Amino acid sequence: QVQLVESGGGLVQAGGSLGLSCAASGSIFSTNAMAWYRQAPGKQREMVARITRGGTANYADSVKGRFTISRDNAKNVVYLQMNSLKPEDTAVYYCNAEVWSSGWALRWGQGTQVTVSS
């Protein structure tokens, strides 16, 4: 059983910073791309940032220059450092990962709330 568990969400004032982490655990032989998504109330889930196993990252235009995604392949952990936060960044943040266990599968975490007050 593969699980992804996010941590690090919370409440922060506009202009502040938060760091999220997501750890994959279970019978994992390898991970491929890992990503962060977010979903605000009444909106569709959208990709925030994605990183390949080799470290190539891409970002949504709305977070470029403010968010940084990174990963630790040895620990199967992906991070999201969020700086200069805005109220519109308020959402539930989810991580996902392409995981090889008994075959390749896309796994999702349960989500962590990020609230940015103005």
Image: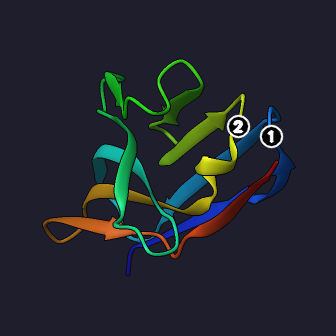
Q: How many other residues sit within 10 Å of disc 1, few (<14), some (14-19) or many (≥20)?
A: some
Horizontal side of 73 relative to 89 (left or right) equals left
Q: Are marks 2 and 1 in contact (CB under 8 Å)?
A: yes
The disc label shown at residue 85, or none = 2
Under circle 2, the secondary element is: loop
Q: Which residue is drawn at 38% across and 81% down?
A: 1
Looking at the image, which residue sits at the far bottom?
Answer: 1
What is the quadrant of residue 10 in the picture?
bottom right
Horizontal side of 106 relative to 26 (left or right) equals left
117 and 102: which is toward the camera: 117
User: To which residue does mark 1 refer?
Assistant: 14
Q: Which residue is drawn at 58% across and 41% down?
A: 79
Three-letter amino acid code at the position of disc 1: Ala
Q: Tell which circle, 2 or 1, labels the residue nearer the N-terminal end.
A: 1
Under circle 1, the secondary element is: loop
Q: How has the structure been colored for display?
A: rainbow
